[in-house]
Image: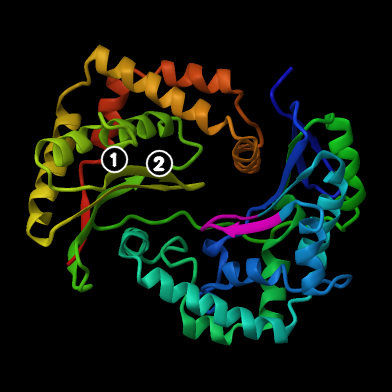
């Protein structure tokens, strides 16, 4: 039996469930709607909509939405990315149907009252100010803006205070009608009950709404010109990113690229950049490499922070390590260690049922299928040195960089 079992509701919402021995249930409704689905006049509306979902429905006032699961010891929360909005809940097993009913009410019957939006705009304005005070986070968004300039992926999820202040209830409703269609939703659950029970509850509360189909397609980002920029941010330290475009989530080269980033600057003390910048030269406390795949593109970002006087040396050492990976095949021993580390990371991340459930929901949304852990492990073990060398040359040949000083 597969780890996850799937089903489809009459209105096109797809479901995915895993039965586990636990008294706690996690569930989520993943909607394929994020900041890249915004019109140029709507920047920030996807995130504002996520906030507004909790501010009242046709059946509940805001405080009733917030208290419904918390009074039972559970929780309801949400987050927005560039490509999806996810509403997720954690409850005891016998409260599963209550969680699904509330999620259905919030997604399909929210009213987005203007009086509540006025307060929420202030909350988001404060969130934007807080974000601007965090250069280690802000630089990622600035780097992506430059990397995807002219694309729907190339703007901040939070939007600007000026844009948020203009967005109205009717504009949110229009955005939801356009992007929250049932063919772009997945209901994911994990708990100690059968898929038949999960489906029955989902049909009762989610399957009763009219089917809807998305009427547009996302535009694949065009080519970009590599850049080399320094911005004055008057920060205590220098913050920098060196990186490039990566593969989309459906590309078979995604796993070799993810493994490459792990070798270069993963969370382990023996990553190449940690050894070079921190252990050997004592230049940086924070250095890491990440790969973020989107549905049709991706981004590789190598981040570091250092004293202002050391930033240029950090960049030089990073580029040297990248050059080695592009010219010297990784040794069999180092590759074997890297694959074991990568598989262990995957296994540990899936140990938490909530994270496993959220990851499965998004994978099913994008792939219309999901690999078992065993299948994923086999794919990692099949990666050879030539594949790592190939993706290094393909993705890391024309690097861009952005430095905060």
Magenta residues, start to end:
76-86
Q: Could you tell me how many numbered marks the image carries?
A: 2
Q: Where is residue 331 in the image (x, y as percent from the top left)?
A: 22, 16
- Residue at 69% across, 24% down: 3
Return the residue at label 2.
247
**80 magenta-colored:** yes
The 10 Å Cα crowd at callout 2, few under 14, some 14 to 19, many 20 or more, is many
Q: Where is residue 386 in the image (x, y as percent from the top left)?
A: 28, 20
Rendered image coloring scheme: rainbow
The numbered mark at residue 395 is 1
Label 2 sits on a secondary structure element that is loop
- Residue at 92% across, 48% down: 204
Task: Report whether 172 appears left or right of 165.
Answer: right
The 10 Å Cα crowd at callout 1, few under 14, some 14 to 19, many 20 or more, is some
Task: Report whether 58 appears left or right of 2.
Answer: right
Badge 2 or badge 1: first in the primary sequence: 2
Against 171, residue 245 (above or below) is above
Label 1 sits on a secondary structure element that is helix
- Residue at 71% across, 61% down: 180
Give 370 or 274, whichever is nearer the viewer: 274
Against 19, residue 149 (above or below) is below
**48 magenta-colored:** no
Q: Where is residue 99 in the image (x, y as percent from the top left)?
A: 81, 51
Q: Do the residues labelled 2 and 1 touch (CB within 8 Å)?
A: yes
Query: How far is the residue under mark 2 from the one under mark 1?
Result: 8 Å
Quadrant of the rendered image containing residue 330: top left
Q: Is any atom of residue 133 visible in this view?
A: yes
Give 300 or 91, whichever is nearer the viewer: 91
Quadrant of the rendered image containing residue 23: top right
- Residue at 22% across, 69% down: 235
Q: Is any atom of residue 188 visible in this view?
A: no
């Amino acid at each position: 039996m597969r780890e996850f079992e799937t089903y489809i509701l009459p209105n096109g919402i797809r479901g995915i469930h895993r039965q586990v021995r636990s008294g706690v249930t996690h569930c989520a409704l993943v909607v394929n709607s994020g900041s890249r689905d915004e019109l140029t006049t709507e920047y920030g509306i996807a995130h504002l909509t996520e906030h507004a979902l909790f501010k009242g429905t046709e059946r509940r006032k805001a405080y009733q939405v917030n208290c419904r699961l918390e009074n039972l010891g559970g929780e309801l929360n949400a987050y927005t990315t560039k490509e999806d909005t996810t509403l997720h809940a954690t409850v005891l097993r016998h409260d599963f149907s209550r969680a699904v009913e509330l999620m259905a009410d919030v997604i399909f019957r929210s009213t987005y009252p203007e009086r509540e939006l006025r307060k929420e705009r202030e909350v988001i304005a404060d969130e934007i100010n807080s974000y601007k005070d965090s250069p280690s986070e802000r630089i990622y968004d600035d780097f992506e803006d430059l990397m995807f300039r002219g694309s729907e992926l190339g703007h901040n999820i939070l939007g600007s205070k000026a844009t948020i202040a203009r967005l109205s209830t009717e504009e949110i409703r229009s955005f939801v009608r356009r992007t929250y269609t049932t063919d772009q939703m997945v209901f994911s659950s994990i708990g100690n009950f059968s898929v038949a029970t999960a489906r029955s509850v989902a049909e009762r509360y989610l399957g009763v709404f009219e089917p809807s189909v998305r009427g547009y397609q996302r535009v694949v980002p065009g080519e970009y010109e590599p850049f080399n920029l320094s911005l004055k941010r008057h920060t205590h330290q220098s913050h920098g990113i060196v990186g490039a475009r990566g593969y989309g989530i459906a590309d078979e080269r995604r796993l070799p690229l993810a493994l490459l980033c792990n070798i270069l600057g993963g969370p382990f003390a023996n990553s190449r950049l940690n050894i070079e910048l921190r252990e050997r030269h004592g230049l940086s406390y924070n250095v890491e490499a990440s790969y973020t795949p989107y549905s049709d593109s991706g981004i590789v970002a190598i981040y570091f922070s250092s004293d202002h006087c050391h930033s240029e040396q950090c960049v030089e050492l990073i580029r040297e390590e990248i050059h080695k990976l592009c010219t010297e095949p990784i040794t069999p021993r180092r590759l074997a260690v890297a694959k074991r580390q990568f598989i262990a990371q995957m296994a540990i991340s899936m140990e938490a049922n909530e994270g496993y459930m959220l990851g499965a929901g998004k994978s099913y949304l994008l792939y219309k299928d999901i690999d078992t852990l065993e299948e994923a492990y086999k794919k990692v073990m099949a990666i050879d040195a030539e594949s790592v060398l190939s993706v290094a040359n393909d993705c890391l040949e024309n690097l861009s960089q952005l430095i905060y000083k």
